[in-house]
Image (cartoon, rainbow, N blue to C red):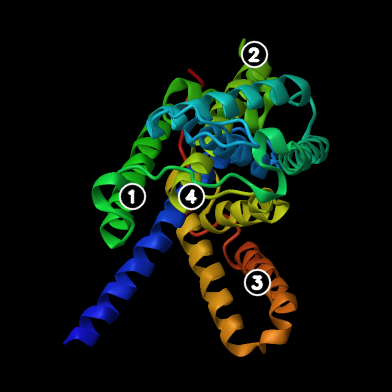
Amino acid sequence: MADVGGWLSGWLSYGSFFLVFCACYAIIALGLNLQWGFTGLFNVGVAGFVAVGAYTSAILTTPEVADRVGGFGWPVAAGWAAAMATSGLAGLLVGVITLRLRDDYLAITTFGIAVTIQLVATNAQRLTGGPFGVQFIPKPLQGWLGTGLPWTLAYLALTLLLLGIVYMALEQLVRSPWGRVLRAIREDEDAAGSLGKRAFAFRLQSFVIGSMLMGLGGAVYAHFVGYIAPEDFLPILTFQLWAMLIVGGSGNNRGAVLGAFVVWGFWSAAGSLLRGWVPQADQARAAALQVVLIGVLIALMLVLRPRGLLGEETRVSRVG
């Protein structure tokens, strides 16, 4: 009986851990979906905005350390709000500079900005801890629940609640006249402009809100794992999030959430299988196969279901 209880506790712990990661990625994917799925903004710098949010909340909430800026002792909720504000400000600055670019040029520019942010995180040791990262990031509710399964389940409930709030707020936004303008700009910017809609202003608003959600997702992730470092925000993170949106279906918030759960599940399962099948000496090289398998999944989706698992809902509506 004890063995059954231990087995059940282990699976419950792993399942809740897995779902917290899914929910964090789903929040970020919703931000990307607002930018790309509804507005057509090809942002390939997602990892940079996630990093800004994660580092902002971590720096403001961690205890004082000798070799790094910190010790502000802010509550976690205030850290999350600051993460949204800082990543939104970063989105505003980047958007003002880049959003007049189109397609490939916007993608190249945002990718370069994300790489720059990652390099700053690596080298600005007094601010970010450099390659050693930020440790001792506080975990909400841990003082009452400890570090075991009860805390993980509580954090899962908190993260799912946050995801639900973000999802419902975005649904209200994209179904409003504002959201209809975004889709009109995505389909034909000149036509939307002829109706008196300032395309650049709407594109900038979408980019900033999406960036804020990316920062929030990064902050929620940081306070779950308790430690962040520059290697957490490499371009592979952007690739994973784009895969989630493509598989789930861009232009549909339910698709963005579903894609986060499906792709992260696929990624985790592939990693477990490779670790079991590949000899220890070849583990590092075999890890690259996870990326290949995700690429194969994307290719299959584009061939079999180009609109994703839950494609965009077709609506007949006027621009309000």
* Residue 256 seen from this side: no
Instruction: Tell me which label, 1 or 4, sits earlier in the chain.
Output: 1
In terms of secondary structure, where does tag 4 sit?
loop
Position of 93 compared to 306: left or right? right
Identify which residue, 234 or 172, lies in the foreground.
Answer: 234
In terms of secondary structure, where does tag 1 sit?
helix
How far separated are the C-alphas under marks 2 and 3? Answer: 42 Å
Instruction: Tell me which label, 4 or 2, sits earlier in the chain.
Output: 2
Q: Which residue does the numbered mark 1 point to in the structure image?
A: 155
Q: Nearer the viewer, mark 1 or mark 4?
A: 4
Q: Nearer the viewer, mark 2 or mark 3?
A: 3
Instruction: Tell me which label, 1 or 2, sits earlier in the chain.
Output: 1
Instruction: Tell me which label, 4 or 3, sits earlier in the chain.
Output: 4
Identify which residue, 96 or 130, lies in the foreground.
Answer: 130
Q: Residues within 10 Å of mark 2 (few under 14, many from 20)?
A: some
Residue 198: give its label: 2
Amino acid type indicated by mark 4: Gly
In terms of secondary structure, where does tag 2 sit?
loop
* Residue 46 seen from this side: yes
Q: Quadrant of residue 196?
A: top right
Amino acid type indicated by mark 2: Arg
Residues at marks 1 and 2 touching, judged by CB atoms closer than 8 Å:
no
Amino acid type indicated by mark 1: Tyr
Q: Nearer the viewer, mark 4 or mark 2?
A: 4
Identify which residue, 213 or 36, lies in the foreground.
Answer: 213
- Residue 167: % across, % down: 39, 39
Q: Residue at x 44, y 29 (%)?
A: 73
- Residue 264: % across, % down: 51, 62
Q: Which residue does the numbered mark 3 point to in the structure image?
A: 290
Position of 287 compared to 210: left or right? right
How far separated are the C-alphas under marks 1 and 4? Answer: 13 Å
